[in-house]
Image: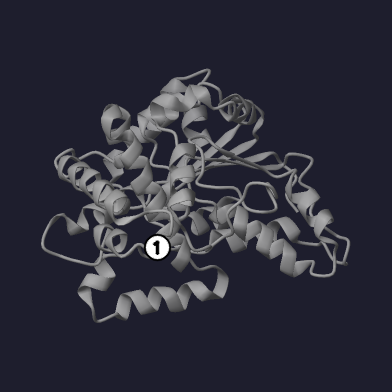
Amino acid sequence: MIEKKILFVLGAGASCPYGYPSGSELRRLILYNAGSFSGGFLDSYRNFKSKDLDQSKKHTKLQQIKQFIETFNGAVKSIDVFIANNSKFAPIGKYIIAFEIFRTEQESRFREEIQPAKEHLEHHDNRQYVLGKAGFQGGDWYSYLFKRITDGLVGRDALPDFSNGNISFITFNYDRSLEYFFYDSLRCLYYEVAEDKKVQALNHLKILHVYGNIAHLKWQNPCDYVDYKQQINESILQNAANKIRTVYEEKENPEVIEAKNLLQQADQIFFLGFGFARENMEVLGLPGLISEDCLILGTVLGLEPKEINDIRDQIVKGLKHGGITDRNLNRVKLENVDCLKLLRNYL
C-alpha cells in the first residue's frame, strides 16, 4: 500500500522496458532508411496496406515522408522539437510518430515476456532487423509498481482504491502502454470481479498525457477506442496524428492545468526516463510549482556527472525557495539508474 501522494512524471525512457523507443531511438528508427539500409520505418510504411489508402494517395504520402526525412536528417534535434519549429512538417511528422508507435505496440511485451523478447533482439543474426527496431531497455517497473499498489489486498473484492489520489501520472509520451498494463493486470488479478467495477476503479487513476496520446482503449472510452495491438489502417493513423500535440500546442490541452495541480500537491515526485528538457519543464511550470516539502527523485541514465550536476542545479535554483542550499540539494536526488532501480531504492 502507498500512503503518500506520489506523482510520476514520465518521459520516453519510461516506456523503453516494454519495447518502445526513447527520443533518440525514435529519431534513429525514422532515419534508418535515409541511407542504404532497409528494415526501418520507411520499409515498414512501404509494406503498409490499408483498404482506405489507395496507391495514388500512398504515393503522395510517401513523397511527403521522404521530404520530411531528408530535412529531419540534418536537423539534429528530436522529432518533437523539429515539428514544433517547422509547422509545414507538423502533419506528416505527427503521422510518422503515430505509425511508429502503433508499429512498436504490435511487438511490445510485458512482465515475463520482456526477457525473451530482449534476448531475441540481442541474438538475432540479421543486423538490419535489429537496427530497424527499438530495444527493451531497463527493468520492468510497471510490474513492480503494480505489486506495491496491491500489496495486502486479498480477496475477490479487494480492488485498489485510486480515488484518494495517492498515485498519479503525468506523461509526455504518446503511447498507451501504461494504461493497457494497469487494465490487463487488474483484469487478470481480479478475474471474477465484474468488469464495470474494475473499470470504475481504474477511472479514478489519473494518467494525464501532456501532449496527447494516439488513441483511447475500450475501458477508457467504449464509443471511441482502438484495441491494443489492433491492426492499423489509414483512418486510425490519421485520427492518432490529429491527437498528437507539440510543445508549443500545449495551451490547447486542459490537462496541463490539472497536471500543475498534481505537482503542487505531491509529497514525492519521480521523474522517470524524463530527460529534463527545458521546454518540457516550462510547459508544467517546473520546478517552481513544486512544494517546499516535496522530495524530487529522477533517473538520469547514461549521463555524465557534470550533466547530472547541471540538471540538479537547474532544478534547485528554480524551486519556490530556490538556491544552492544543503536543504534544497538534499531534496533533489538524481541517479544514473533505470526506472525500476530508482523505485526499488526510494518507493
- For numbered disc 1, what is the local secondary structure? loop
Q: What residue is drawn where x is 53% and y is 18%? A: 320
Seen from the viewer's position, the closer of residues 131 and 225 is 225
Residue holding disc 1: 137
Drawn side of residue 144 relative to residue 247, left or right: right
Residue 302: x and y, percent?
32, 52
Q: Amino acid at mark 1?
A: Gln
- Compared with 208, 300 (above or below) is below
- Compared with 258, 163 (above or below) is below
The answer to whether residue 286 is seen in the rendering is: no
Seen from the viewer's position, the closer of residues 306 and 282 is 282
Q: What residue is drawn where x is 15% and y is 54%? A: 34
Q: What residue is drawn where x is 42% and y is 61%? A: 104
Q: Determine which quarter of the picture holds residue 1.
A: bottom right
Residue 216: x and y, percent?
60, 48
- Compared with 123, 303 (above or below) is above
Q: What residue is drawn where x is 54% and y is 27%? A: 253
Residue 326: x and y, percent?
47, 29
The answer to whether residue 207 is seen in the rendering is: yes
Q: Determine which quarter of the picture holds residue 190.
A: bottom right
Residue 176: x and y, percent?
54, 52
